[in-house]
Image (spheres, rainbow, N blue to C red):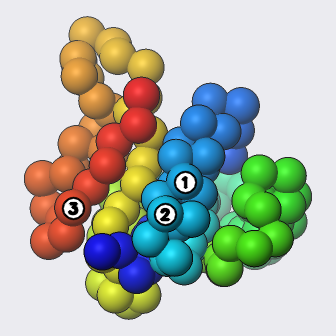
Amino acid sequence: MYKDILVSIDLGHAEGEVRTLETAVDYARTFGSRLHVMTVVPDYGMSIVGGFFPKGHEHDAIQHANEALHEFTKKYVPDEIKHRHIVGHGSIYREILRYADEVKADLIVLSASRPSPEDYLIGPNAARVVRHASISVLVVR
């Protein structure tokens, strides 16, 4: 049923993402799917903000995220599950949607953030992915 599953991981809260990745692994095992394990390094939007950071900080952040993502998957994705790593850069929900299209994903798996007054049920990025995705989205609590 699902050939390609995109799973988005927030490495800033890696301990809270274990269940999300385990859920995606269970789906991949059940359906014989490939996992596309993704994390996104956010940009700072306005160039004036980026000017306060040293040169090359975005490159370094992306490289660090890639290494951390590989370590995370090594720990939680069994060897028999086909998977690849993706590090996006920019708007989190836009990058998730863009890569879902790029890899021709059949399903997006992501976690819900902890509820706060302004995002009562799911976080703003998860809500936007759910609203704008053209494929099924599984939100793991």
Which image quadrant: the C terminus? top left
- Kindly state the secondary structure of the residue where label 3 is placed: strand
Q: Is residue 50 left or right of residue 129?
A: right
Whether pointer 1 and pointer 2 mark residues with C-beta atoms closer than 8 Å, the reply is yes
Residue 26 got which mark? 1
Q: Indicate the quadrant where residue 113 lies.
A: top left
Residue 123 visible in image: yes
The residue that label 2 is drawn on is 30
Residue at x-position 12% and y-position 53% = 131
Which image quadrant: the N terminus? bottom left
Q: Please tell me which residue lies in front, 116 or 31.
A: 31
Residue 136 got which mark? 3
Q: Is residue 99 above or below residue 111?
A: below
3 or 1: tag closer to the N-terminus? 1
Query: Percent from the top left, x then y, of residue 34?
Result: 54, 79
Q: Indicate the quadrant where residue 118 lies.
A: top left
**Distance from Cα at disc 1 to Cα at disc 2:** 6 Å
**Distance from Cα at disc 2 to Cα at disc 3:** 17 Å
2 or 3: tag closer to the N-terminus? 2
- Kindly state the secondary structure of the residue where label 1 is placed: helix
Disc 2 marks a residue whose amino acid type is Thr
Residue 8 got which mark? none
Query: Percent from the top left, x then y, of residue 114?
Result: 43, 20
Q: Residue furthest top?
A: 117
- Kindly state the secondary structure of the residue where label 2 is placed: helix
Q: Is residue 23 above or below residue 120?
A: below
Disc 3 marks a residue whose amino acid type is Ser
